[in-house]
Amino acid sequence: MTFINPLQSVERHGITFPDCPCHHPRHLIPALLFPPCHQCRQHHHRPQTIQEDLRLRRLLHRHRQHRLTSGAPAGFGYVSNLPYGRTFFHRPTNRYSDGRLVIDFVAQSLSLPFLPPYRQNPSSATGVNFAVAGSTAISHDFFVKNNVTLSITPGSLETQLGWFDQYLNGERLVGDDALFWVGETGANDYAYTVGSSVPSSTVQRLAVDSVTRFLQALLKKGAKYLVVQGLPATGCLPLALTLSPQSDRDDLGCVASVNKQSSSHNAALQARLESLRKQFPQAAIVYADFWNSYAAVLKNWAKYGFKETLKACCGSGGGPFNFQVFDACGSPSSTTCPDPSRYVNWDGVHLTEAMNKVVSDLFLNGTFSNPPFEYLLRKKERAAGKY
């Protein structure tokens, strides 16, 4: 989650929409983004561009396991070293990728700077990121009570919201112009309970409940514009593919049981979002469909410029997935592919900058957002008297 103070002037930007017959100005809203990731790539159709000067008051971001703060999930302890960050920053930045994340591309499309982590700069005048590596939707206490040992910092959505409340310093309402971007949250909850006595149905119920309470808290604080990401097709990650039997595959070549689990989670989440829309009719709540956008890329990988869809660019072991849990990206035995832009997956769990760019575009252009992101912009314009 990141917080950005009012910007008096913002450079022109471009956000793409595929079906616009001509250029239409759009007054984009300031954004609050929570979690754990653009402009069109040369490899596919370039839609028309929406341009307008922005006056953004707040941007907050939390992005599931693609984190900018300290605390690395087990097996991925090399994020502070190259080759992480090699593509864009040419140095490690504690991003779980070779370069930029979805939120980086969203921020850039809004002509905003990259966002610093809260724990490094809790009083930043320009913005703060509240993300936690390996965090969960469900409270850490639940895992402790069920004897599920976490080897990462015990951060959850409650942690993010607590930090945000501290940052607000007693203020109850956020600015009317704020956009809340809630990244995919819950995949870690399922991963941490694999092999335990906790059924996935319980994880789904509790995780979706936690996300719902989180969103309700934001809406009660005055949030009016929200984008909520669902879970990706987690069965298509090299980690899942390496640990599953060959017999457990779907038409994407991914782990069928894991993808079904993520899809079921997303259906439950969307039902809650619909209830929140009725409870808070003044708010615009957009669902960003990570699962189907991910699947769309895998079904048409050449269209988006990819060559390897299920194999990690950075990893060890070779073979179809190039992933070994205890010799992950950055370890002495790992190697890195020469061209990450041709790979969907970076390190076995996290995506390449190229895939992050495609996914952000698919969210922003409305194709995989419901209602389309443009709906949210139009609602903001009407509220501002622009329409």
Image (cartoon, rainbow, N blue to C red):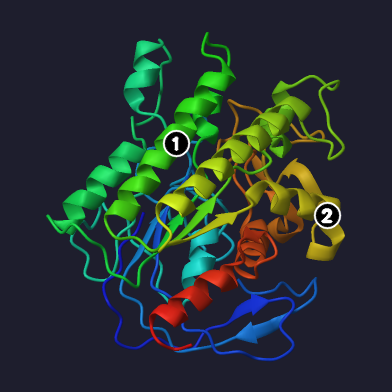
Residue 357 spot, x, y in % from top left: 63, 64
Residue 328 spot, x, y in % from top left: 59, 34
Q: Can residue 119 be seen in this view?
A: no
Task: Name which residue type carries label 2.
Answer: Lys
Report how far apart the C-alphas of labels 2 and 1 lie in the structure: 28 Å
Q: Mark 2 points at which residue?
A: 307
In the rendered image of this protein, does residue 311 appear above or below residue 200? below
Residue 240 badge = none
Residue 32 spot, x, y in % from top left: 37, 62
User: 381 or 102: which is nearer to us?
Assistant: 381
User: 268 or 85: which is nearer to us?
Assistant: 268
Task: Name which residue type carries label 1.
Answer: Gly
Residue 14: image quadrant is bottom right
- Left or right: where does residue 376 sit relative to residue 220? right
Disc nearest the viewer among 2 and 1: 1
In the rendered image of this protein, does residue 387 appear above or below residue 328? below
Q: How crowded is mark 2: few (under 14 residues within 10 Å), some or many (20 or more)?
A: some
Q: Which residue is depicted at the point 73% across and 27% down?
A: 242
Q: Which residue is depicted at the point 61% across and 27% down?
A: 325
Residue 375 spot, x, y in % from top left: 56, 71
Q: Which residue is depicted at the point 40% across and 87% down?
A: 385
SS type, badge 2: loop
Furthest residue toward left: 170
Contact check, label 2 and label 1, Cβ < 8 Å = no
Q: Mark 1 points at which residue?
A: 134
- Left or right: where does residue 327 sit relative to residue 248? left
User: 382 or 99: which is nearer to us?
Assistant: 382
